[in-house]
């Protein structure tokens, strides 16, 4: 069997590892357009802040490819798929035959259309080269504007503040983290950022990036001008699905896959940030461009590629951030727009804010800020879609823990099939 | 005995079970765990240590009953899948879920997905901590400290057998 994987990040690497685990003889080939292999993109801001070095970026051992007997084409971009002849072509014209192909090409930063965007000093943080460039400019830069107050923008801003830069975050929405948390949590996070020297401007957008060759400032749509020597665009990502659309695969927001991670071509699979999968909380097709989802999908895709029919349960949107010691985790639907949802919340001022979004006695979303220890237990309630009415009064209590959920696990054993749940039930 | 325990520790099939009918919530397991993960490993010296040791096990109540719960070392571990830094991994030989403090960046992705809430935040050092199966000793601190015999080390079958025998006696 010849397996070819495009992409060398979470989904691709997990898929390769899974394929090798079950098939010692298969020919596995990985293609990545980057030469620095096996690094975690999510850690790039930690590299910028100085918390880790380049070595610390790697999420697998250096000998991963060799140990798993994987052939690699690194630093080479895959440019075309010939689905009929089951051949992948690289930019240097190398043709690679496959029996099963996985597209795990990830995503790229969203672009900005403002004038001046191509000036020197306008950067994104997605690849190791981006981070290296930012680090190399650190000595020359004093003020930095970060465009985007979502997860990416704030992580960039946090890292740069750790380097003692004067950072201003420009947020189009009326709140930070508008995709991740509600206004209540956002306000608390924003206050913590501001207290630690990050300026946040909400409800404004960049109109123009000023300067000659290099950035010298930024003009906002409210007429205000900011002085800065660097602009970071942190406004989310778009899936790298061009190669899929070009060969005729069905693509909507990202590559459309079925519950087996199979695209519209039976020999081609997709996983990670480039795949549009079932969203558990929302019960729709959605792209959840997140590390844990990419790993799960990479594994599921590999199992199905190797003929072990294994349906993927779907993904749950979930995020965890920690700014200046304030942790926040959110999952699923955090700000319901339609009717029919019930919201329960609990606040301990200065300590925590916790909120659950319920629908029909099921948990469909959550925001935990300041006290995140029970977040994982809530995640299994969201994923299993079980009736929580009997323990509803306990969910936000300070002493909520797994034991409180055990009666529900006992009543819904079909939803909790992992051995570990059963082991804990033996003497229950 | 010690050799037997060591072999047990290395076996994939052996784990720590809690007999919920026997646990009284005395928290001896919690204290023993914290002490075992301190610098001095001595309960009277721990108090003076600069960094407070973190317990990785918790006695949790279900109504009037109590269960002593720690990392279940899941075979298909959600924390390992969620870990973006490669700090968490599975030991293929023992089945243990391992955590590398040096690789951990304290992103709390593992806290976000642990079904049992068994991963603890070490806020001081900004890293996650969890049950490491007491690498510095032959047995397990929590089990050794359990005064009621609720905590049990063995295979699932052995634990079930023990429960059956107990039921017969009663």
Image (cartoon, grey):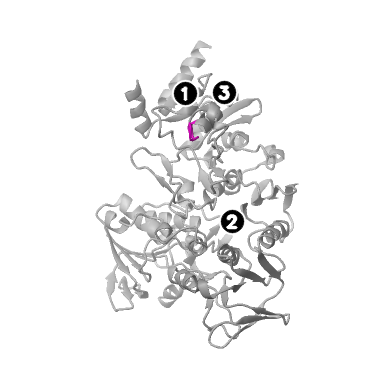
Is the stretch drawn in magenta largely helix, strand or loop? loop
Q: Which mark is residue A84?
A: none
Q: Provide the chain ID for the residue under circle 1.
A: B
Seen at 69% across and 40% down, the residue is A397
Chain name for mark 2 = A
Q: Residues within 10 Å of mark 2 (few under 14, many from 20)?
A: some
Residue annotated with mark 2: A321
Residue behind mark 1: B144
Cα gap from disc 3 to disc 1, whole angstroms: 14 Å
Secondary structure, mark 2, is strand
Q: Nearer the viewer, mark 3 or mark 2?
A: 2
* Residue at 37% across, 42% down: B91
- Of helix, strand and loop, which one carries label 3? loop
C-alpha separation, residue under disc 3 versus residue under disc 2: 36 Å
The boundaries of the magenta stretch are B36-40
Q: Quadrant of residue B98?
A: top left
Judging from the image, mark 3 belongs to the subunit labelled: B
SS assignment at label 1: helix
Most extreme residue toward the left is A25
Residue B75 location in percent, x, y? 42, 41
Label at residue B23: 3
Vertical order, B145 against A297 (above or below): above
User: In screen coordinates, is B17 left or right of A392?
Assistant: left
Tell me, yes or no, if residue A198 can be seen here: yes
């Amino acid at each position: 069997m010849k397996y070819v994987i495009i992409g060398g990040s979470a989904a691709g690497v997990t898929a390769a590892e899974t394929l090798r685990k079950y098939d010692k003889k298969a020919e596995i080939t990985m293609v990545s357009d980057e030469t620095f292999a096996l690094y975690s993109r999510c850690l790039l801001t930690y590299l910028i802040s100085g918390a880790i070095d380049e070595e610390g970026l790697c999420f697998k051992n250096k000998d991963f490819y060799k140990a798993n007997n994987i052939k690699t084409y690194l630093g080479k971009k895959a440019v075309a798929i010939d689905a009929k002849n089951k051949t992948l072509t690289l930019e240097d014209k190398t043709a690679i035959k496959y029996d099963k192909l996985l597209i795990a090409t990830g995503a790229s930063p969203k672009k900005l259309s403002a004038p001046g965007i191509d000036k020197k000093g306008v950067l994104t943080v997605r690849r190791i080269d981006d981070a290296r460039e930012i680090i190399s400019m650190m000595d020359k830069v004093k003020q930095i504007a970060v465009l985007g107050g979502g997860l990416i923008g704030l992580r960039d801003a946090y890292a740069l503040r750790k380097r003692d830069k004067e950072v201003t975050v420009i947020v189009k929405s009326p709140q930070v983290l508008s995709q991740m948390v509600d206004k209540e949590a956002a306000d608390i996070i924003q206050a913590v950022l501001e207290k630690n020297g990050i300026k946040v401007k909400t409800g404004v957008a960049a109109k123009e990036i000023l300067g000659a060759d290099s950035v010298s400032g930024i003009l906002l749509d409210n007429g205000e001008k900011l002085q800065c020597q660097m602009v970071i665009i942190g406004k989310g990502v778009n899936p790298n699905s061009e190669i899929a659309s070009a060969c005729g695969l069905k693509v909507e927001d990202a590559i459309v896959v079925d519950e087996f991670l199979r695209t519209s071509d039976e020999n081609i699979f997709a996983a990670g940030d480039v795949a549009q999968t079932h969203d558990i909380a929302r019960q729709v097709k959605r792209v959840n461009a997140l590390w844990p989802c990419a790993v799960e999908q990479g594994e599921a895709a590999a199992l199905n590629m190797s003929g072990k029919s294994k349906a993927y349960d779907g993904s749950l949107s979930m995020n965890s951030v920690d700014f200046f010691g304030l942790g926040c985790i959110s999952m699923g639907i955090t700000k319901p727009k339609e009717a029919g949802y019930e919201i329960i919340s609990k606040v301990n001022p200065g300590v925590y804010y916790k909120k659950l979004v319920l629908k029909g006695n099921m948990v469909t979303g959550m925001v935990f800020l300041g006290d995140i220890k029970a977040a994982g237990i809530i995640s299994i309630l969201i994923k299993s879609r079980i009736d929580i009415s009997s323990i509803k009064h306990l969910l936000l209590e300070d002493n909520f823990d797994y034991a409180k959920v055990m009666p529900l696990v006992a009543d819904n054993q079909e939803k909790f099939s992992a051995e570990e749940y059963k082991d804990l039930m033996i003497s229950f | 005995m010690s050799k037997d325990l060591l072999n047990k520790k290395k076996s994939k099939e052996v784990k720590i079970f809690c007999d919920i009918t026997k646990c009284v919530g005395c928290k001896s397991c919690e204290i023993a765990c914290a002490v075992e993960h301190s610098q001095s490993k001595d309960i009277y010296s721990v108090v003076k240590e600069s960094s407070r040791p973190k317990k990785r096990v918790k006695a949790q109540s279900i109504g009037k009953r109590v269960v002593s719960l720690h990392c279940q070392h899941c075979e298909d571990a959600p924390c390992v899948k969620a870990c973006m830094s490669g700090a968490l991994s599975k030991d293929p030989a023992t089945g243990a879920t391992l955590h590398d403090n040096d690789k951990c960046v304290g992103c709390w992705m593992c806290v976000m997905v642990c079904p049992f809430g068994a991963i603890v935040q070490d806020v001081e050092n900004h890293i996650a901590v969890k049950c490491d199966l007491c690498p510095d000793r032959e047995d397990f601190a929590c089990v050794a400290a359990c005064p009621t015999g609720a905590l049990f080390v063995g295979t699932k079958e052995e634990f079930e057998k023990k429960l059956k025998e107990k039921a017969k006696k009663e």
